[in-house]
Structure formats: C-alpha cells, structure tokens
Amino acid sequence: MNILKNPFAKSTAPTDPPETVLMTATDKAWGAYIVASRAWKTETEKLAGARSDLEQATHTVGEHMADGKDTSAALVAMQAAQSLVTQRESAVAILLQRKQEAEANWTHAKRQAAIETVAEACTRLRSLGPQWEAFLKEASRLAHDTTEAANTLRVACGNERFGFALAEIRGQADLFLGLSMCALTGSGFIPERLRKYRSMSECLESISGAKDRAG
C-alpha cells in the first residue's frame, strides 16, 4: 500500500542511534539490528526481482515451444534465472536468521539495561537511608529545642500574652515541613501568597519581636 508522506513531517520510524564517543550496549545492539534488518530487506527486494525475472524467462521458454522455435537460449536464461532465485532464497534465509538473532540480542540488551537501571536506583535509594536518619534525628532535636524555647518565653512573659506562641510555631512547623516534603508526599503545597510567613525563620522572628515589644 502506498502512503503519501508529508516531506516536512518528523519521522517516527526507528533510526540509527546517535553517534557518541561512548555507546551503550543497547545502542550497539540496536545499531546491529538496524544493519541486519536493512540487509534482509534489500536482499528480499532482490529476491522478488529475481523471481519476476524467472517468471518472465519461463514464459519465454513456453512461448518458444508454442511457436516451434529453438528454446536452447531461452532455457539457458531460465536456468540462470532459477539458479539466481535459489541463491537469493538462501541469502534471504541467512539474513533473516541474522536479523532475528540481532533482534534477540537487542531485546536482551534492553532487558539487561533495565535490570542495571533498577539496581542503580535501588542502590541510590538505600544510600538515602542514613541521610533520612540524620535528618529525622536533627528534626527531633530541633523540635525539642524549639518547644523548650517557646515554653520558656510563655512562662517568662505570661500565658495571657504569649500562650499562643507554641501553637503558632506548631502550626507553621507543620506547614513548612509539609512544603519541604511535598515533592515526596504529593501533598502539603500552599502558594506563597496564602502563607502567613514566608519562612519558619520569619515566624520565629515575629514571635520574638512580639516579646521584645511586650518588654
């Protein structure tokens, strides 16, 4: 079936991998598969032509016989055409096997690359464990110190004016922790224009400033 193609359209057909200084095993396997596929396709087209020539040569022999003409030359041509078809068929079979082997190698290379990618991702993920433990330990220490400082402020300045401090800090801590984790959790994001403070530091500065004003 003939399909009219837009000459300006981008092709989505498989192409050779880009030439790089260091090609991956998958790239090399893909390149080998492309080469094998093209060789098989070219030889298949030549076989089709050889079969057409054989059909024509056989028809010529039949015509000569029907007309009572000498068929010697026509028979030689037909035999040559038959021999070429046999050779082309053998070549196509060999190239098809090579194409199938190249495709199998490419499939194996892709599978192996996927396995290696998974292994690398798992290694990286495991390496983050100690960082998480250090982060959680530091977060626990920071929460304890912040609670202690807020309670000291409340006791020193009185519940009536500064009883809100710890509740305010807790609320903002939840907000900013949620923001810092939203890439992982997929939730907790609040646009900056809707936040009371731009940062946790601003929250603590505001509460400390209120204490200074009270003094």
Image (cartoon, rainbow, N blue to C red):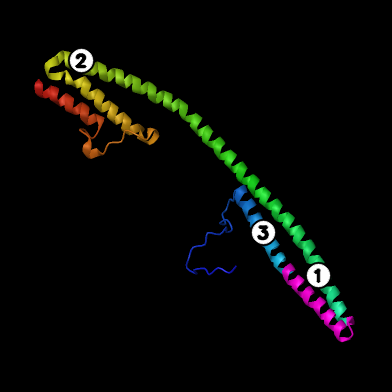
In the shown orientation, is residue 125 left or right of residue 53? left
Magenta range: 47-72
Q: Picture quarter containing residue 31?
A: bottom right
Residue underneath mark 1: 84
Name the residue located 86 percent from the left edge and 86 percent from the top edge. Answer: 67
What amino acid does circle 2 point to?
Answer: Thr
Per the image, label 1 sits on a secondary structure element best described as helix
Q: CA distance from mark 2 to mark 3?
A: 78 Å
Residue underneath mark 3: 37
The quarter in which the C terminus is drawn is top left
The quarter in which the N terminus is drawn is bottom right
Q: Nearer the viewer, mark 1 or mark 2?
A: 1
Per the image, label 3 sits on a secondary structure element best described as helix
Q: Picture quarter containing residue 202?
A: top left
Residue underneath mark 2: 152
Per the image, label 2 sits on a secondary structure element best described as helix
> Residue 101 in the image: x percent, y percent?
71, 51
Q: Nearer the viewer, mark 2 or mark 3?
A: 3
Name the residue located 49 percent from the left edge and 63 percent from the top edge. Answer: 10
What amino acid does circle 1 point to?
Answer: Leu
